[in-house]
């Protein structure tokens, strides 16, 4: 079987004979086979057991026909060995959130192969298993998004603790972000060394910042991450949730691909990003609850907006939702392939 | 005391000697006096008792120095008499959310003076009490935002139920939206007849829609609301949360003022909206947790972005957060006045 490198070529804005597609959170609860796997182990155990993580990673490749695999893991995995106890309740929870200098001083910048070897082991396992199929994407949270969890202790509506730290103690905030940034660089480079063929930086919460605050408190750290990667031959995807108003700044972070949510049309996004940057997106994940002909219509509409210019990886605008009907996810992937296929 | 009509003139894009300012949710828990008032009655009782609603409305006018009063109420108040039981737990909850045609057919379009007379009574009380001070803003949720609560049953992360209804049963969705739209028009016109001097349409959740879906499933109804108002001399403000990517469509709804959150710079927003539409916003509510000099710097930065062109009402980009220090809210209002005051 020939290696399907559609995804890697699209990341490099090279011409492709068909638009590649994958789905954020594609190894997840919408799959019956994933729910069966989860009966054997809780979420953290899955993340920390290379065989289980690899098995979950493979499910959507084998069952849904996506053009890339993304490592089954969680963005908070590399944070735990910085010195923070992590629980899933099932929502992620740091019982002892970061609120003062002493806590920040105590944070470590861990060696990934020592602290989270199971991640790299899963990557190595997967490269063997995937060989001849599709590329493997590694990933990390962006420093800002990781900081939201570390300072708030979990999810948040208003991010009062984190923004208070930013506004009241910018020096302390910078010290925290420096440590997270260094951790992320080491973590992603370890995944690349282990065999990840592309990496995605998830800045899920970057869009809660005003343009000015994004430029001051987020962008410099994301840019440092991207600059710090051993990215020779390894495309970097940069996804910012609710980031449509920030695209002119996001492009300065220097990624090969920018992931875009559904709040902006892709032709509009490409106009702002300019040539040379590929885009990834952007069907609203709830659109997968529409009847299949309507899903197909929406896929076609997005493909039409992108047109013939190279540099498009199809994806959802956010992670696939657990109650999504499996058949609809498959119909989505099939529609991308069918409608984008160049004849001849 | 002369009538302070700064707010009304700014809504009409007329020149003003000082930028008017108010804060969404300004009659709320951040005020100690409000928390004292709430000891006497629960939230729904406050909304339904004209004297209490009027007393809450007056607090920020008297204590914080804002240039407009906004009626103390909740966007879900007019929905209850459509035939839906409403609870606050304290989050809003409809125990019997709308999921089928029979439920939609059963919804009434109530007469506001019969069904929620306490709202209009509060408006009448307030016009007497405010006379000689500042204008009174009435408000309603936009049809789409009201539909999110009615169909989801409360707040939501992904809006699967509402979006499923939209995508699977567009005719049913339209029937629901028609009834909500008619209810909102009657409700706002009743507030105007009772004496509201401006009205704001809150489309808090409009920004969860893609541009195409916004155009199909939200904009036509908001436009119908605005077209249906007896707006002679009564400016209409249209606020869409996370709406920065939708501004070119929002302007088609036809309001006098567009409320903008902090995710886009105001000069950028004005460029998209074009001349003749005033803007309202847009300090990040969490910026009020910054030290006062930093709040002042941010106020000045926003004023500088707007420049001398008329048509700016200063506000937060979203409701003021309950833990906001009261002194910081006052410093914010003072800073807007001080920095925007035209000399001579």
Image (cartoon, coloured by chain):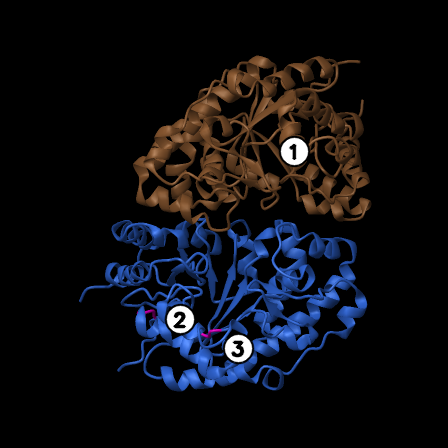
Chain colours: A brown, B blue
Which residue has dot 3 on it? B45
Q: Position of residue B177 (x, y in %)?
A: 69, 66
Residue A134 left/right relative to B263:
right
Q: Residue at x 39, y 72 (%)?
A: B36
Front: mark 2 or 1: 1
Most foreground residue, A33 or B150: A33
From the viewer's side, name the closer residue of A107 and B30. A107
Residue B193 vertical placement versus A18 (above, below): below
In the picture, measured across the screen, residue B275 lies left or right of residue B332, that is right
Tell me the SS state at disc 3.
helix
Disc 1 sits on a residue from what chain? A
Q: Position of residue A243 (x, y in %)?
A: 52, 41
Which one is in front, A97 or A236? A97
Q: Are marks 1 and 3 on the same chain?
A: no
Same subunit under labels 2 and 1?
no
Please, what secondary structure does the residue beneath circle 1 have? helix
Position of residue B68 relative to residue B241, above or below, is below
x, y percentage for residue A195?
61, 14
Give the answer, above or below, for where B39 lies relative to A46: below
The secondary structure type at the circle numbered 2 is: helix
* Mark 2–mark 1 distance (CA, rounded to whole Å): 44 Å
> Residue at image x 43%, y 67%?
B28
Q: Is residue B225 left or right of residue A328?
A: left
Q: Nearer the viewer, mark 1 or mark 3?
A: 1
Subunit of label 2: B
Residue designated by label 1: A43
Mark 1 and mark 3 residues within 8 Å of each other at the beta carbon: no
In magenta, the rendered stretch is B65-72
The quarter in which the N terminus of chain B is drawn is bottom left
Chain-order first, disc 2 or disc 3: 2
């Amino acid at each position: 079987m020939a290696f399907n490198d559609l995804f890697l070529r699209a990341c490099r804005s090279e011409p492709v004979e068909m638009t590649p597609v994958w789905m954020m959170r594609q190894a997840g609860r919408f799959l019956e086979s994933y729910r069966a796997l989860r009966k054997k182990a809780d979420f953290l155990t899955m993340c920390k057991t290379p065989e289980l993580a690899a098995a979950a990673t493979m499910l959507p490749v084998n069952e849904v026909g996506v053009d890339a695999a993304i490592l089954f893991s969680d963005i908070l995995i590399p944070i735990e060995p910085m010195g923070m106890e992590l629980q899933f309740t099932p929502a992620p929870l740091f019982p002892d959130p970061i609120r003062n200098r002493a806590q920040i001083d105590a944070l470590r910048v861990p060696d990934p192969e020592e602290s989270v070897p199971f991640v790299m082991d899963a990557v190595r396992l997967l490269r063997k298993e995937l060989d001849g199929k599709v590329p493997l994407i590694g990933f990390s949270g962006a420093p800002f998004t990781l900081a939201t969890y570390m300072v708030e202790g979990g999810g948040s509506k208003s991010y009062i603790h984190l923004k208070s730290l930013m506004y009241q103690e910018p020096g302390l905030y910078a010290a925290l972000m420096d440590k997270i940034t260094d951790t992320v660089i080491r973590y992603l480079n370890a995944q690349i060394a282990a065999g990840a063929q592309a990496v995605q930086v998830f800045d899920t919460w970057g869009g809660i910042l005003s343009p000015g605050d994004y430029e001051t408190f987020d962008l410099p750290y994301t840019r440092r991450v991207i600059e710090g990667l051993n990215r020779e031959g390894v495309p970097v995807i940069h996804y910012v949730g609710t980031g449509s108003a920030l695209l002119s700044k996001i492009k300065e972070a220097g990624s090969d691909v920018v992931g875009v949510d559904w709040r902006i049309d892709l032709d509009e996004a490409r106009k702002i990003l300019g040539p040379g940057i590929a885009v990834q997106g952007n069907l609203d994940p709830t659109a997968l609850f529409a009847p299949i002909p309507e899903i197909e219509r929406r896929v076609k509409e997005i493909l039409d907006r992108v047109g013939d210019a190279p540099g498009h990886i199809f994806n959802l605008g956010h992670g696939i939702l657990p109650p999504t009907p499996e058949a609809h996810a498959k119909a989505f992937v099939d529609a991308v392939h069918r409608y984008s296929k160049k004849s001849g």
